[in-house]
């Protein structure tokens, strides 16, 4: 490459939240520059809030079932469409009620954004940049960025017909990319898969006037037909990727106006330590559409991750990071969080995790900066978890929620319903569990499972008892009729499934979760906690309106603390011996809903007041000293 080579424009369009930078832009820029290709990112999504109001922008940036963040660009992308707006709003009435409440707007405001503000913003984008100086314009696309990208690509192609345009990103797998190419003549190329090797090579070939034939990862047009040599191979040398560059995001954060908005959130920088899913390689969760061809797990070394965190924190004075990995590499538990804790670091990390971490591991990771998780909880029923291919248990998930609550780790988990082989008892059980554990952090959402593109529910519907599957209704209002094959361009699908329980069997669980969420949001929050003297614990139960208090001493107190981690009866007997008082004590704990028995294990539900709680410090010698003392029976409730 020569010094005179034209730069590549890298564009990220709305509708995205301004809270988070585009990691794709931040990584592609140094990747291209390493190959001798100049690049300039444009975080155009950071300017849209100034046009429509940041409160509305942040509300519709969330990926709602209606996909309103795509819908508002339908006119800008395709012109006037023959769709029924009233029908659209009615179909997603409850969704739009929630959106409008959060954004303090009306559906009429959203319609005005589609008809006026969105097309005006496209004009702003065209006029605000000298696009003519670029040799290639690339659009990075994740959820709710497709139509805005098509709209700007169309406008740019009219003004600069000689400049080629390429789409890429996580939302453009092979089938979707092919369908978009066929229906969008303004798009010259699409890229599918990891871009570290094939994208710089594509730019070289383009600038040299060479054919793309045989270059994996790139779709192109030849003789009026879309050509494709297959998805780019998974990139394995993760330690060789450059540190992402976020300077342009911080510039756009200031110049776009978000920085001055009173509701602006603190910066959370995305980092990437791994790609793929080591769990999905073995057991692809039935509802998960992530990764697809990129399921192969590959990760950076812990030292490389810490070095990247240090560099980014030093460069931008930021201490909060969002790991965009689909799952945490197992070795990171100690080799990253352990090292951060040892260094007394103030770096804080959000991570997606498996729900298989112990109390001790969660405590150490919290000490090392794990402030937020998105775990694969999904259910408290072991039977349903087996159907999902989670290979977890209901008790394990309850334990994770318990200890995340105790350690102050924000837990963004979901509960999913409707799976083949589920039973009425599965939901009765979960409803009973919720009634006992609503002093733990509630789920972020409870919803019916969906057949996302790429998930086993989508690729092998018969195995999941699915008898009918259609694109989600929102796509009928987003895309013009007949322009695209919705079966090929949609990511979300609706389905009918056999071998499930009737809808009414979900109602009690849905209601209890809604009440749980409401109490945590509006307060006062329920609590179940205990304080300890030397051999006595006092349990304060504020889960219901009438406060209750219990007191246990000596062996009973020791037993309750021992079951802070879920224990089998055999483990309890091995610890305390075959003693008659054990069964009566367990029955008493269960009767007061102070303990949960699930999957053959007993779990104490009260959270310790002690911020340094560790049942391992209760030694056998301590046990022997306490065991010879008389047992004090539980006290009746106070104020009865």
Image (cartoon, rainbow, N blue to C red):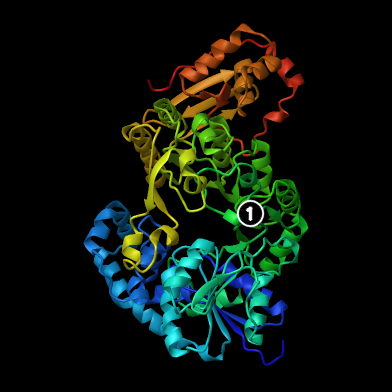
Q: Split into 4 quadrants, where in the image is the N terminus? A: bottom right
Q: Where 414 sits versus 107, above or below?
A: above
| Frontmost residue, 520 versus 185 | 185
Residue at 63 percent across and 16 percent down: it is: 555
Horizontal side of residue 590 vs 631, given as left or right: left
x and y, in percent, of residue 224 in the image: 49, 78
Q: Where 633 sits versus 205, above or below?
A: above
* Residue under label 1: 276
| Frontmost residue, 565 versus 355 | 355
Residue at 26 percent across and 64 percent down: it is: 107
- Residue 260 in view of the camera: no
| Frontmost residue, 616 versus 114 | 114
- Residue 204 in view of the camera: yes
Q: Where 526 sits versus 345, above or below?
A: above
Residue at 59 percent across and 35 percent down: it is: 391
Q: Split into 4 quadrants, where in the image is the C terminus? A: top left
User: Considering the numbered disc 1 on the image, is that residue within a helix, a strand or a loop?
Assistant: loop
Residue at 32 percent across and 74 percent down: it is: 75
| Frontmost residue, 400 versus 458 | 458
Return the residue found at the far bottom: 4
The 10 Å Cα crowd at callout 1, few under 14, some 14 to 19, many 20 or more, is many
x and y, in percent, of residue 117 in the image: 33, 77
Return the residue found at the far top: 580
Q: Where 115 sits versus 320, above or below?
A: below
x and y, in percent, of residue 175 in the image: 50, 62
Return the residue found at the far front: 223
């Amino acid at each position: 490459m020569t010094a005179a080579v034209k730069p590549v424009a890298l564009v990220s369009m709305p509708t995205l939240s301004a809270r988070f930078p585009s990691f794709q832009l931040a990584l592609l820029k140094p990747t291209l520059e390493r190959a001798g290709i100049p690049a300039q990112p444009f975080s155009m999504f950071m300017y849209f809030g100034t046009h429509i109001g940041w409160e509305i922008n942040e509300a519709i940036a969330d990926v709602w079932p209606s996909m309103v963040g795509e819908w508002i660009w339908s006119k800008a992308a395709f012109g006037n469409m023959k769709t029924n707006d009233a029908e659209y709003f009615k179909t997603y009435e409850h969704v739009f009620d929630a959106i409008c409440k959060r954004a303090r707007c009306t559906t009429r405001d959203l319609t005005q954004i589609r008809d006026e503000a969105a097309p005006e913003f496209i004009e702003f984008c065209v006029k605000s940049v000298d696009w003519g100086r670029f040799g290639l314009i690339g659009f990075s696309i994740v959820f709710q960025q497709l139509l805005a990208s098509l709209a700007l690509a169309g406008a740019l192609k009219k003004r600069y017909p000689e400049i080629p345009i390429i789409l890429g990103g996580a939302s453009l797998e092979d089938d979707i990319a092919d369908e978009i190419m066929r229906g969008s003549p303004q798009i010259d190329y699409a890229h599918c898969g990891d871009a570290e090797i094939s994208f710089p090579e594509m730019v070289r070939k383009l600038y040299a006037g060479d054919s793309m034939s045989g270059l994996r990862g790139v779709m192109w047009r030849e003789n009026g037909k879309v050509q494709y040599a297959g998805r780019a191979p998974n990139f394995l040398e993760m330690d060789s990727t450059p540190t992402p560059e976020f300077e342009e995001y911080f510039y756009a954060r200031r110049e776009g106006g978000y920085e001055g908005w009173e509701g602006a959130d603190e910066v959370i920088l995305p980092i990437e330590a791994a790609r793929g899913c080591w769990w999905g390689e073995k057991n692809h969760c039935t509802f998960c559409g992530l990764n697809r061809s990129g399921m192969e797990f590959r990760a950076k070394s812990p030292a490389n991750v810490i070095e990247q965190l240090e560099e980014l924190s030093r460069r931008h004075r930021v201490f909060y990071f969002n790991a965009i990995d689909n799952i945490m590499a197992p070795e990171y538990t100690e080799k990253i969080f352990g090292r951060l804790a040892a260094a007394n670091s103030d770096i804080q990390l959000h991570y997606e995790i498996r729900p298989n971490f112990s109390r001790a591991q969660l405590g150490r990771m919290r000490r090392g900066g794990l402030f937020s998780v998105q775990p694969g909880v999904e259910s408290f029923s072991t039977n349903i978890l087996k159907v999902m291919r989670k290979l977890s248990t209901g008790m394990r998930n309850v334990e994770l929620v318990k200890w995340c609550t105790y350690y102050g780790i924000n837990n963004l988990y979901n509960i999913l319903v409707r799976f083949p082989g589920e039973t009425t008892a599965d939901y009765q059980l979960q409803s009973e569990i919720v009634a006992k554990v609503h002093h733990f952090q509630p789920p972020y959402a409870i919803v019916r499972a969906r057949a996302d593109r790429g998930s086993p529910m989508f690729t092998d519907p018969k195995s999941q008892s699915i008898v009918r599957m259609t694109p989600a209704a929102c796509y009928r209002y987003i895309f013009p009729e007949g322009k695209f094959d919705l079966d090929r361009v949609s990511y979300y699908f609706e389905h009918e499934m056999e071998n499930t329980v009737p809808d009414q069997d979900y109602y009690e669980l849905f209601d209890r979760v809604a009440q749980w969420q409401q109490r945590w949001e509006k307060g006062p929050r329920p609590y179940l906690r205990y304080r300890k003297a030397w051999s006595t614990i006092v349990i304060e139960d504020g889960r219901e309106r009438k406060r209750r208090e219990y007191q246990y001493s000596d062996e009973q107190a020791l037993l309750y603390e021992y079951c802070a981690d879920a224990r089998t009866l055999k483990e309890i007997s091995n610890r305390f011996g075959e003693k008659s008082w054990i069964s009566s004590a367990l029955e008493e704990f269960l009767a007061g809903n102070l303990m949960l028995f699930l999957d053959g294990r007993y779990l104490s539900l009260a959270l310790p007041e002690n911020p340094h709680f560790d049942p391992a410090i209760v030694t056998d010698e301590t046990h022997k000293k306490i065991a010879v003392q008389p047992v004090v029976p539980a006290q009746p409730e106070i104020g009865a």
